[in-house]
Image (tube, rainbow, N blue to C red):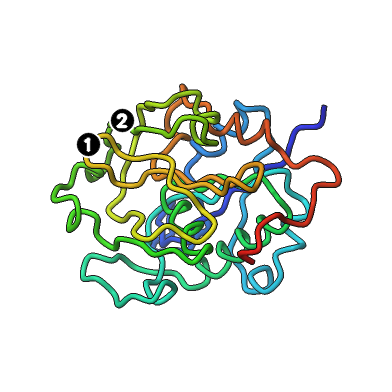
Amino acid sequence: MTRPTVGITAAVEEVSYGSWKDVSAALSPMSYVRSVLRAGGRPILLVPNPDDADDPSGVLDFLDALIVSGGAGDLDPSLYGQKRHPETGPVNPERDAYELALVAGAVERELPTLGVCRGIEVINVAYGGTLEQHLPDVVGHEKHRKRGTFVDHDVRIAENSLAARATGNVLEAVKSCHHQGIKEVGDGLLATGWAKMDDAVEAVENPKLPFMLGVLWHPEEDERSRLISSLLERRREPGAGSGKSDRF
């Protein structure tokens, strides 16, 4: 069987390497690549560009599944009708537009899609939802992140949900590193995962599509996680429909 092609969205960051300092680069942690390879897929990096933001079909037509990755940088709060919070980090309008377009196109194609950390936020905003710009203001603690490492905690998952089927659990041990979260769940999505420690929303999904799931944790950092393997198992089938959601 042909290895499914999995697109992984890339961040755009200023990096230094060799003799070069402060170079703008498109990048993604190798943990995403390795997790797709372990699951039997062919990973390719999707670099933000205005042309594909206007019409992502040329990219999506080549993909069997999509991962909207995490990474530094927050979504522009104006995309969901809010003013900037003092704790909101740098924004990249080009990346925002590109990833929102990919999600909209994935819905139309019923393309299996997994959003990770920032990726769940992209999915939620694409569906008209809003974000908590600084989660500690709401939950009263900083236990969802620790600088330079991941935080281990448990997530409760709704029985019979896509999130439960994809993880194989209704209580999932996860690795997290985020300061934002879900506020209002987007139209057409359901919240199906919550942090055990404070009930913050950790997973949202579209029950009308074969696999449209966002999680606030990082399954690519945990070799025990079944999430990315589950995504590839639901790869787009030949002749998949043009979408079951009227959100777009």
Q: Residues within 10 Å of mark 1 (few under 14, many from 20)?
A: few
Residue type pointed to by label 2: Asp
Which residue shows up at 46% across the image and 51% down it?
120
For this view, does 136 lie left or right of residue 84? left
Q: Residues within 10 Å of mark 2 (few under 14, many from 20)?
A: some
Which residue shows up at 54% across the image and 57% down it?
188
Instruction: Give the SS element for disc 1.
Output: loop
For this view, does 144 lie left or right of residue 246? left
Indicate the position of residue 67 as horizontal and vertical percent values. Answer: 57, 46
Which residue shows up at 28% across the image and 38% down it?
149
Which residue is identified by label 2? 154
Indicate the position of residue 72 as horizontal and vertical percent values. Answer: 38, 56
For this view, does 233 lie left or right of residue 122? right
Q: Residues at badges 2 and 1 in contact (C-beta under 8 Å)?
A: yes
Indicate the position of residue 103 as horizontal and vertical percent values. Answer: 60, 58
Indicate the position of residue 56 as horizontal and vertical percent values. Answer: 70, 65
In this rendering, is residue 156 above or below 130? above
Residue 181 lies in quadrant? bottom left
Which residue is identified by label 1? 197
In this rendering, is residue 202 above or below 105? above
Which residue shows up at 67% across the image and 28% down it?
40
Quadrant of the frame with the N terminus: top right
Quadrant of the frame with the C terminus: bottom right
Q: Nearer the viewer, residue 237 or 247?
A: 247
Residue type pointed to by label 1: Met
Instruction: Give the SS element for disc 2.
Output: strand
Please give the label number shown on residue 246: none
Label 2 to label 1: alpha-carbon separation = 8 Å
For this view, does 85 lie left or right of residue 58? left
Q: Nearer the viewer, residue 209 or 41?
A: 209
Q: Farthest residue toward the left?
A: 140
